[in-house]
Image: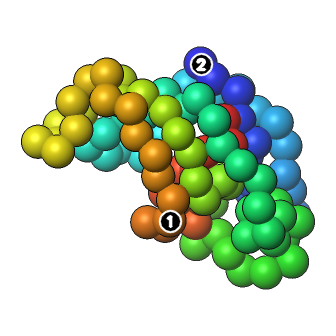
Amino acid sequence: MFKCLLIDKDENGYRTSIAELSEEKLAQGNVLVKNLYSTLNYKDALAITGKAPVIRSFPMIPGIDFRGIVEHSESDEFKVGDKVLLNGFGVGEKHMGGLS
């Protein structure tokens, strides 16, 4: 389980909350990173407030960048224990972001 900022949208509207999720709730991918640091920037603020259509799928953890350590990898490019930095690539829009 981990804590995160979670944005959701349904027929009742758009809302942001602090949530506790299990890893099973994350989209399946080939690399899992334990997030150590993230920033809050202008694009994240737009996503969190709903002032611009930044997020492409819901629910979403915002945060377009993060730094962490690879915990699981099915990729030849990353191995467990690698330190990584990510910015962009649809993170916080199409893929769960760094505000966790």
Q: Residue at x 63, y 35 (%)?
A: 37
* Number of the label disc, if any, that sits on residue 1: 2
Q: Between tags 2 and 1, which lies in front? A: 1
- Counting every numbered tag in the picture gives 2
The residue at the far left in this view is: 76
Q: Residue at x 58, y 53 (%)?
A: 65
The amino acid type found where label 1 is placed reads Gly
On the image, the x and y values in percent for residue 51 come to 86, 77
The amino acid type found where label 2 is placed reads Met
Figure check: 90 above or below 3: below
Q: Seen in the image, is 8 located left or right of residue 87?
A: right
* Number of the label disc, if any, that sits on residue 88: 1
Place residue 41 in its image quadrant.
bottom right
Q: Residue at x 51, y 59 (%)?
A: 87
The residue at the far bottom in this view is: 52
On the image, the x and y values in percent for residue 96 come to 54, 50
